[in-house]
Amino acid sequence: MTGPGPGWSYGGPPPTRPWGAQPQVPRSWVPAPPLPPPPPPPTGGRPVTPPGAPPFDEPQPYAWLMRSRDWAWWRPLLGLLLFAVLYAVAAVVVVFVVVLTGVVPVADLLQLTDPGVLLVTNASLIVAIPIVWAAWAVAHGMGRGWSGSVRGRIRWQLLRPLTWRALVTIGVGVVVTIGLSLTDGPVSITGPDGSYVWLLVVVLLTTPLQSAAEEFVFRGYLSQTVAAWFRTERTGAVVAAVLTAALFSAAHAPPDVLTFADRFVFGLAASWVTRLTGGLEAAIVLHAVNNVVVFVLAGALGGDTGTALPLSFGISLLITLLDVVAMGAYVWLVARARRTLRPELASPAVDLRRPPTARQQTWQPTWVPAPPLLPQAPASTVPEPDPRWSREGGA
């Protein structure tokens, strides 16, 4: 085979079209076929709550916070069973630790003005708070904050303005009623003893938490459980208030009918202010101020001025009436305070209940066809191939 002759120059590879081959590059862009429509969303299931979104399709009041997007009638029953089991275990552990360590003599467990006894008693009640939170998480799949208010948390900014309202009503009422109890028969007032400072420490540090624990249970989980089973929220809230007030009074082992009535009204007042404010803050303040003032005064007076003095019927009736007036005054102040405090009364909500057809119709493909390529040069402008590079070969 001989090489190219004199005067030869390279003209590039020959085009393929003159020999019947397909063009190497298409002359125009062919759009891709349209994407298939997305499959329809499953029917019959509940939409999944996005992270950080409230678990409600509609704003809910505090009594109906259990009626979330995943509400089912059996969830409160599961929560109550879980609470009963965990609290029984916790109570046994507390008693076991007390008996094993001998910190508090078992015979003195009813002497609540003793700092050790009060500390153990408060601790056995405070453990109910994390147990309530566990019931919300396990049985309802919701955050612990929904046990506190419609905002999904305790609204700390409400505590200070509510506290002074409780002091001028409930606090003054406690002082007056204890003073009346001292006039009923011979009472020995010995004054504070050497453990009074420790009693103050225990009262100020643990009694507010003990009061909050009782509210989380009675005005919180129990009331919300009862109310959630009713078709109308108002009916459920009323029935829950009456039932939990009766259970609250019975749990304190009242020695007579008047004491039962006094604590029953206390429970009703706590439920009322909870409904007025959309959370437990007002009820916790009511309970904490009452208990703190009682124990501080009882420890300061000493002697026979305990929290369960046997009183005559007349003094007991007068004390009960004064308590009712004081609690009514607190409820009235809380109702008026809503104008300035502006507490939220309903939860935030995100409606995820759009029908499947609407969701499917709003879907649109996002692809855009690519622009067509530039047209190729006409065939007449393509130079003829060099015969020396033809398929038959050159000379």
Image (cartoon, rainbow, N blue to C red):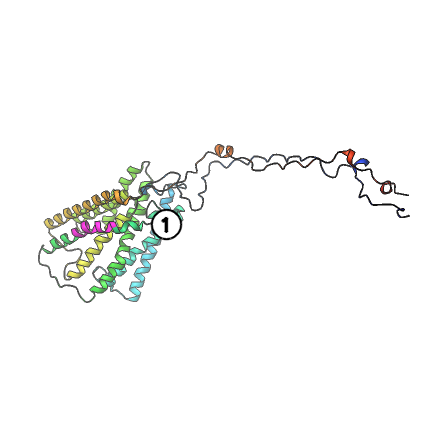
Magenta region: 161-173
Relative to residue 3, is residue 305 drawn left or right?
Answer: left
Callout count: 1
Relative to residue 49, is residue 230 drawn left or right?
Answer: left
Task: Give the main secondary structure of the magenta stretch.
Answer: helix
Observer able to see residue 271: no
Observer able to see residue 269: yes
Vertical comparison of 192 with 44: above or below: below
Q: Within the magenta stretch, is there residue 171?
A: yes
The residue nearer to you, when weighing 272 against 80, is: 272
x and y, in percent, of residue 281 in the image: 28, 49
Residue shown at 79% from the left, 38% from the top: 16
Instruction: Estimate how packed mark 1 is, as few (under 14), some (14 to 19) or many (20 or more) residues with alpha carbons within 10 Å.
Output: some
The residue nearer to you, when weighing 283 against 255, is: 283
Residue shown at 27% from the left, 66% from the top: 103
x and y, in percent, of residue 279 in the image: 30, 46
SS type, badge 1: helix
Vertical comparison of 356 with 206: above or below: above
Callout 1 amino acid: Arg
Residue shown at 77% from the left, 35% from the top: 381
Vertical comparison of 7 with 203: above or below: above
Residue reaching furthest to the front: 7
| Residue pointed to by mark 1 | 144
- Which quadrant holds the C terminus? top right
Relative to residue 353, is residue 22 drawn left or right?
Answer: right
x and y, in percent, of residue 116 in the image: 25, 63
Q: Within the magenta stretch, is there residue 16?
A: no
Residue shown at 30% from the left, 60% from the top: 95
The residue nearer to you, when weighing 256 against 66, is: 66
